[in-house]
Image (spheres, rainbow, N blue to C red):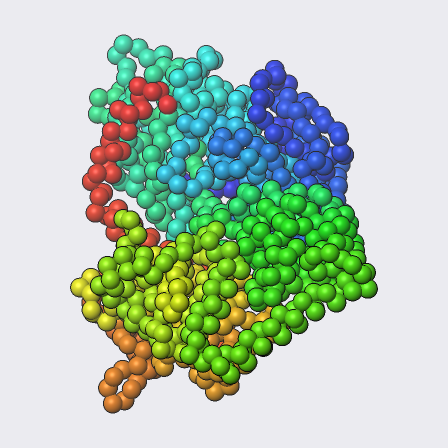
């Protein structure tokens, strides 16, 4: 018989009938009753579990009590609750043992606490990842969610997110440590689907006192099953799962001895994965002429067996990996030919896989921002992970999001936050900080020198405070060289670097210093034009040299002499490519391959691009942007040294120059990599940066075909004054140039989106941006014509021979066509593009995985057939 998934925790009302249990070891248990008055605690009478108030775990929310007429049906830990009418996300911080496997349980009982019967729906998160949606349909029914999870940090955030459908609340949180050998998954965490005690007529909700792990066991009975039981204690000493004896002492067997036991359910969704754990123990002492052994099939295929459970001893059969995704799961347990007795089952647990893929924010940044919050007593709702998920980052923070890499804090705005005291030294730990605004507060003391050691800092606002003393010389130098936007006005006792002789000149000093610098620069320029024309290129070189020295590049990149470049490139033997700046050569530093970009002394345009690239690469760092290894400035010899990209540029692979044909997965991965690089430039940098020359030749591939954006010579930095565009001379490559930008000279981030859309169409089709025929058809026009026919296979590169998932391809084409909309307002942001491409990639990977599973069905069945051999000696 099949069973449907239902909320068996409504049976908690029956827990009031349980007898008081003897106290057991609660070591490692975390039991939190939400809404309980601060500093109070109690022991729940029916389970003996000790509960404490939630007041120390959260600093927001309102304490409430449920209706008395509902309270009498439930245990004491849910008599109160905490509601959260304020804030989009409110989080509990629970300290745990990192690496320990926990059963995490969240309990929600509305209990008509508000007297209005308003039943909400909201989201439940664990850390930065969505755990589940909580939908309350009856104020007197409890909703309980369980998750088996191994924390990677020494704390876990349990967060409630307001989705606009009512006020979130929480009744109780419970953490129960498990043996790490239990509930092992190949990946992901496990969410409870059902946990069933079969064959029991007395079970009214067994949990702690019976179960050492405090799992809830729901009774499950079928009308055509027969119940078996024993009064003896079932031995689970060799079984790591330790299902309670009271559960294992009862079993179900089919009413018809020749019939199988059947258990089935329909899948939650087309992608849900399941793990199943079946617990067996013989509860009948068999006679010499009796035997019980059985096999189990899943959807008609052998799953395990034969097994013969031992008398009064527990054995657990489980899936070593997630079950193959099916619309319905039908388990059939039937006796073997040699068995005289029908099969039995004592208990079953079913879990779904939860992939919690969003990384927590980098721990060093979390610790630093937590100390800053504590130091200044910041009153904002700063709870949970500071950066993730992206939509719920803390107010005043911006972060970088780089794929699987933990997010980093790149911007901190504490303007008008009532800060008092000195500038906190903990800010120095936010090493990726690009923007810092501490203006309009009551900060006192000096401007600390550690601010100049934040090498990525490009914008510092300290205006309208009570700071005093001298501004560190390093900050002024970076400001003078255009590497830092420094604002220090309205600090009466603050002066420039050096001695502060007169108070009234404090504000003027930095300005005079800057004007003096400009005057000197003007004189130098005049001298160049009047009498030093022949040294024009040398002076440009010195300008580059000055820029390099002023950002302390030596700390991150290595300086090379020209003679060393000759050795590295073997006298510039092998050319990798050419451009407006000059030539790129292959080289080697020790055993590491590099690419050396040399500036042509005669190229004015190349010199300008060279300067732009130097400045930008000093500011940006991302795994999908090419990495600067070193540099050379020696007279007219100027060069940049980059990491070597073994598979060259994307253009060569799409045009057929390379014999390797990129498969669909590789293409979507390359597109995703490039999109992530652009997303970082647009949204991870402050000020944001527009690449302006996105095209296949500027997308390089490493030995694993991971993509990185290159050539930032045309890149443009946007102002930080909130403007949405920059008016600039049109630059870019025909075919990839945003038509709106071309007409208006208004450059926006959507100009890059258009260029990327053209590149994505090239990746999909392997056709050039503009056909070289007389018609000069643009690729977007051609794709539009093919889309009208509704045949996706005619759009995707024919060399793939249809070896790709149709849905993945459709999604990729839709993304690309949206990107190349003639109106920028209709184009997505690069963040949206990244999300869509990742979905396309996920669809393709699932398609590939499914095909792989079909190819290896026989081996999987062999693994399942050997399952008992692996498990029986361990009595698991």
Q: Where is residue 296? Give x, y as percent.
A: 29, 32
Q: Residue at left 72%, top 65%?
A: 509
Image position, residue 250 (x, y; %): 45, 21
Is 836 positioned to the left or the right of 332 in the image? right
Which x, y percent locates residue 403?
Answer: 44, 53
- Name the residue at 39% across, 44% down: 273
Give x and y (percent) for residue 822.
45, 81
- Where 783 sits versus 207, above or below? below
User: In this view of the protein, which residue sits in the foreground, 324 or 375?
Assistant: 375
Which quadrant holds the C terminus? top left
> In the rendered image, which quarter is residue 522 located in?
bottom right
Q: Is residue 700 left or right of residue 453?
A: left
Q: Nearer the viewer, residue 385 or 826?
A: 385
Residue under the image location 64 percent in, 36 percent down: 172
For the question of whether residue 776 can be seen, the reply is: yes
Q: In screen coordinates, is 758 left or right of 54?
A: left
Could you tell me how many numbered marks the image carries? Answer: 0
Seen at 63% across and 32% down, the residue is 13
Q: In the drawing, does residue 62 fall left or right of residue 622? A: right
- The image shows residue 118, relative to residue 800, as above or below, that is above
Query: Farthest residue in the bottom direction?
Result: 774
Query: Is residue 443 in view?
Result: no
Q: Which residue lies most toward the left here?
A: 659
352 vs 25, nearest the viewer: 25
């Amino acid at each position: 018989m099949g069973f449907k998934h239902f909320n068996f925790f409504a049976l908690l009302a029956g827990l009031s009938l349980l007898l008081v249990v003897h106290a057991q070891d609660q070591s490692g248990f975390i039991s939190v009753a939400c809404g309980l008055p601060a500093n109070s605690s109690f022991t729940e009478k029916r389970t003996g579990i000790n509960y404490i108030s939630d007041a120390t775990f959260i600093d927001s929310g309102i304490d409430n009590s449920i209706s008395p007429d509902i309270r009498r049906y439930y245990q004491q830990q849910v008599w109160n609750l905490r509601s959260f009418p304020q804030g989009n996300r409110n989080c509990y911080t629970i300290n745990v043992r990192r690496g320990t496997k926990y059963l995490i349980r969240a309990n929600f009982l509305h209990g008509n606490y508000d007297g209005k019967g308003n039943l909400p729906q909201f989201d439940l998160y664990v850390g930065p990842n969505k755990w589940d949606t909580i939908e309350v349909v009856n104020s007197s029914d409890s909703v309980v969610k369980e998750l088996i999870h191994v924390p990677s940090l020494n704390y876990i955030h349990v967060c409630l997110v307001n989705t606009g459908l009512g006020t979130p609340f929480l009744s109780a949180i419970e953490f129960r440590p498990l043996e790490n050998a239990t509930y092992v998954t190949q990946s992901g965490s496990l969410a409870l689907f059902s946990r069933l005690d079969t064959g029991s007529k007395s079970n009214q909700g067994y949990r702690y006192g019976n179960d050492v792990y405090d799992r809830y066991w729901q009774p499950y009975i079928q009308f055509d099953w027969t119940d078996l039981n024993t009064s003896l204690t079932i031995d689970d000493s060799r079984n790591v799962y330790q299902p309670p004896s009271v559960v294992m002492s009862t079993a179900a067997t089919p009413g018809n001895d020749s019939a199988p036991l059947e258990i089935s359910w329909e899948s939650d969704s087309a992608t849900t994965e399941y793990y199943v754990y079946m617990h067996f123990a013989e509860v009948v002492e068999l006679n010499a002429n009796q035997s019980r052994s059985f096999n189990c099939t899943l959807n008609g295929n052998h799953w395990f067996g034969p097994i013969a459970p031992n008398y009064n001893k527990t054995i657990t059969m489980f899936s070593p990996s997630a079950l193959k995704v099916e619309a319905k799961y039908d388990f059939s347990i039937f006796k073997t030919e040699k068995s005289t007795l029908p099969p039995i089952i004592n208990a079953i647990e079913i879990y779904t896989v939860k992939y919690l893929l969003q990384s927590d924010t980098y721990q060093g940044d979390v610790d630093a921002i937590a100390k800053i919050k504590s130091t200044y007593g910041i009153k904002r709702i700063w709870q949970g992970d500071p950066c993730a998920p992206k939509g719920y980052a803390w107010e005043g923070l911006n972060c970088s999001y780089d794929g699987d890499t933990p997010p980093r804090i790149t911007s901190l705005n504490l303007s008008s936050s009532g800060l008092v005291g000195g500038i906190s030294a903990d800010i120095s730990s936010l090493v990726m900080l690009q923007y810092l605004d501490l203006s309009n507060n009551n900060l006192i003391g000096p401007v600390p020198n550690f601010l100049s050691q934040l090498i990525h800092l490009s914008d510092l606002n300290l205006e309208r405070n009570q700071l005093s003393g001298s501004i560190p010389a390093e900050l002024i130098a970076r400001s003078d060289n255009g590497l830092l936007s420094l604002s220090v006005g309205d600090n009466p006792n603050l002066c420039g670097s050096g001695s502060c002789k007169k108070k009234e000149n404090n504000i003027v000093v930095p300005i005079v210093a800057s004007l003096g610098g400009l005057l000197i620069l003007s004189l130098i320029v005049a001298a160049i034009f009047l009498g030093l024309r022949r040294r024009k290129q040398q002076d440009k070189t010195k300008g580059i040299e000055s820029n390099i020295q002023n950002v302390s590049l030596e700390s991150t990149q290595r300086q090379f002499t020209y003679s060393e470049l000759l050795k590295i490139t073997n006298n510039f033997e092998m050319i990798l490519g050419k451009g407006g700046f000059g030539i790129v050569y292959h080289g080697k530093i020790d055993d590491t391959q590099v690419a050396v970009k040399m500036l042509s002394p005669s190229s004015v345009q190349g010199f300008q691009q060279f300067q732009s690239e130097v400045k930008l690469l000093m500011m940006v760092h991302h795994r999908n942007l090419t990495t600067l290894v070193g540099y050379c400035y020696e007279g007219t010899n100027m060069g940049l040294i980059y990491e070597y990209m073994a598979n060259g540029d994307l253009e060569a692979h799409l045009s057929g120059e390379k014999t390797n044909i990129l498969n669909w997965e590789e293409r979507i991965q390359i597109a995703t990599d490039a999109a992530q690089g652009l997303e970082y430039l647009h949204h991870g940098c402050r000020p944001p940066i527009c690449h302006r020359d996105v095209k296949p030749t500027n997308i390089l591939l490493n030995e694993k075909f991971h993509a990185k954006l290159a050539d930032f010579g045309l890149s443009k930095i946007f102002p930080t004054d909130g403007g949405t565009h920059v008016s600039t001379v049109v630059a870019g490559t025909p075919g990839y140039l945003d038509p709106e930008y071309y007409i208006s000279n208004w450059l926006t981030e959507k100009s890059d989106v258009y260029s990327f859309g053209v590149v994505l169409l090239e990746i999909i089709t392997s056709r050039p941006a503009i056909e070289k025929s007389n018609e000069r058809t643009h690729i977007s026009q051609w794709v539009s014509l093919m889309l009208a026919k509704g045949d996706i296979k005619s759009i995707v590169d024919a060399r793939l021979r249809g070896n790709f998932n149709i849905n993945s391809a459709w999604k990729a084409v839709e993304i690309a066509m949206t990107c190349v909309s003639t109106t920028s307002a209709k184009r997505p942001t690069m963040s949206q593009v990244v999300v869509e491409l990742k979905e396309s990639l996920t669809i393709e990977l699932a398609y590939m995985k499914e095909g792989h599973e079909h190819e290896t069905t026989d081996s999987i069945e062999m693994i399942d057939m050997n399952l008992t051999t692996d498990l029986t000696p361990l009595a698991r």
